[in-house]
Image (tube, helix red, strand yellow):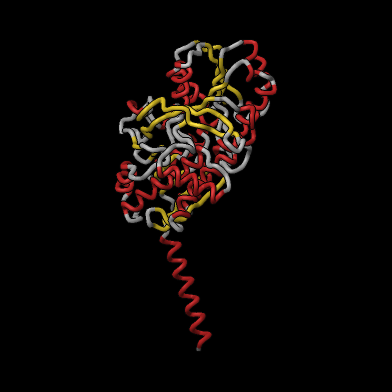
């Protein structure tokens, strides 16, 4: 009898566990976890998971299940993963894409399927303007933003003959367009490289021959590591200063590059040293949990999770009324690690933008230090084209 009762109790426990798992809100994360850019997706995932762990497996008091898969930086694979999340797993909230070419292949289809997509990184201009959508929220930025702030800074600093380098894909073009929107000087050269390129000898030779007074580049992940190392080896850093957005100067990239990045000024909406309560707690908890300083990508993953938490709390975890979920997301009722945060009319951030300098900290580690705020409450250039 006792054994039968124990088996029955075990069965009831298993069924209860299955019911709880079935009731959990599923969130699909399509991201890049392999290739030399894999750490970018890792940080988005880890920042997002930290927010869930802080609530003991919940967001906004609602149990959640995070489904994560690696797109390998391949648009077709990203589409396959997203399709599986929607059709097999019933996902109604999705996030995580790192690269804009993957986003452009995946996100429009997701939106048409009445799934809400929240960008924790890639935010191409096409989705901010005429192709904006009620189901699309960018929690990170609009691609151009972190270059616009550098364009303004470089102009104010008196540079007037800049050489531009970026990969030949949607984000590369957005980033250079953003820089040029606020930069008022001459363009010494504008070069688009292969996405994932490792050897920049030809580009550096052409750059040297052009004799610019500065360089602005957008090369995230492993591309940026290789470029900065080769730039330093060619001793160009001794005569031609380098600028760029935060993506090319994140904490993990700086650990790989080392002294070759010292002195570089870069644009960002976040840094680990921003003085607000939410950020201080995030940085402390991330370091304690993962043993490293969070990157921009981790901060964006964390903020995306906290935004979702605010919406789930508002609708009590009920996603059956997506309009109510959208309305809750629009309110952005959460404490962002970057400080002031709200959505513009195209559901992209209005936020402060800063420039940072790569320095050595008290322990001799290469890191970023916030220099100053350049833009306050900055939106994006495409919001007027959005007709939502």
Of the pair 386 and 162, the residue shown nearer to us: 162
Would you place residue 295 above or below residue 208 in this image? below
Q: Residue furthest front?
A: 362
- Reply above or below: 255 against 184: below
The answer to whether residue 268 is above or below residue 190 is: below
Relative height, residue 223 to residue 215 (above, below): below
Residue at image position (46%, 18%) is 180
Q: Where is residue 382, by image quadrant?
A: top left
| Residue 287 visible from this viewpoint | yes
Residue 275 position within the rendered picture, expressed as x and y whole percent measured from the top left: 42, 38
Q: Nearer the viewer, residue 230 or 31?
A: 230
Q: Nearer the viewer, residue 25 or 335?
A: 335
On the rendered structure, is 261 left or right of 324? right
Identified at 48% across, 52% down, the residue is 66
What x and y, as percent, mark residue 298? Answer: 50, 42
* Residue 73 locus on image (x, y percent): 57, 38
Q: To which quarter of the image does residue 279 belong?
A: top left
């Amino acid at each position: 009898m006792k054994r039968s009762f124990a088996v029955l109790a075990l069965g009831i426990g298993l069924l209860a566990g299955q019911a709880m798992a079935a009731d959990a809100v599923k969130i699909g994360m399509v991201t890049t976890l392999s290739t030399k850019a894999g750490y970018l997706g890792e940080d988005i995932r880890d920042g997002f998971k930290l927010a869930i762990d802080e609530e003991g497996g919940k967001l906004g008091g609602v149990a959640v299940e995070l489904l994560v898969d690696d797109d390998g930086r391949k648009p077709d694979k990203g589409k396959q993963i997203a399709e599986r999340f929607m059709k097999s797993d019933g996902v109604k909230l999705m996030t995580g894409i790192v690269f804009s070419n993957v986003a452009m292949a995946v996100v429009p289809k997701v939106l048409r399927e009445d799934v809400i997509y929240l960008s924790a990184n890639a935010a191409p201009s096409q989705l901010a303007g005429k192709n904006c959508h009620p189901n699309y929220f960018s929690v990170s930025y609009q691609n151009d933003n972190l270059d616009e702030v550098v364009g303004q800074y470089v102009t104010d600093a008196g540079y007037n003959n800049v050489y531009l380098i970026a990969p030949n894909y949607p984000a590369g073009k957005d980033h250079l367009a953003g820089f040029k929107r606020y930069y008022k000087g001459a363009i010494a050269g504008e070069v688009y490289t292969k996405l994932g390129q490792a050897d920049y000898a030809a580009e550096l030779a052409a750059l040297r021959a052009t004799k610019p007074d500065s360089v602005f580049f957008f090369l995230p992940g492993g591309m940026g590591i290789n470029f900065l190392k080769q730039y330093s080896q060619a001793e160009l850093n001794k005569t031609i200063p380098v600028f760029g957005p935060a993506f090319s100067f994140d904490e993990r990239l700086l650990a790989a590059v080392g002294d070759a990045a010292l002195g570089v000024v870069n644009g960002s909406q976040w840094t680990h040293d921003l003085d607000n309560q939410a950020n201080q707690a995030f940085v402390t908890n991330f370091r304690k949990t993962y043993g490293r300083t969070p990157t921009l990508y981790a901060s964006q993953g964390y903020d995306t999770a906290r935004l979702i938490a605010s919406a789930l709390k508002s609708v009590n975890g009920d996603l059956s009324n997506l309009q109510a979920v959208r309305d809750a997301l629009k309110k952005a009722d959460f404490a962002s690690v970057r400080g002031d945060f709200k959505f513009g009319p195209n559901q992209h951030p209005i936020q402060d933008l800063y420039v940072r300098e790569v320095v050595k900290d008290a322990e001799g580690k290469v890191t970023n230090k916030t220099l100053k705020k350049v833009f306050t409450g900055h939106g994006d250039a495409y919001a007027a084209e959005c007709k939502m």
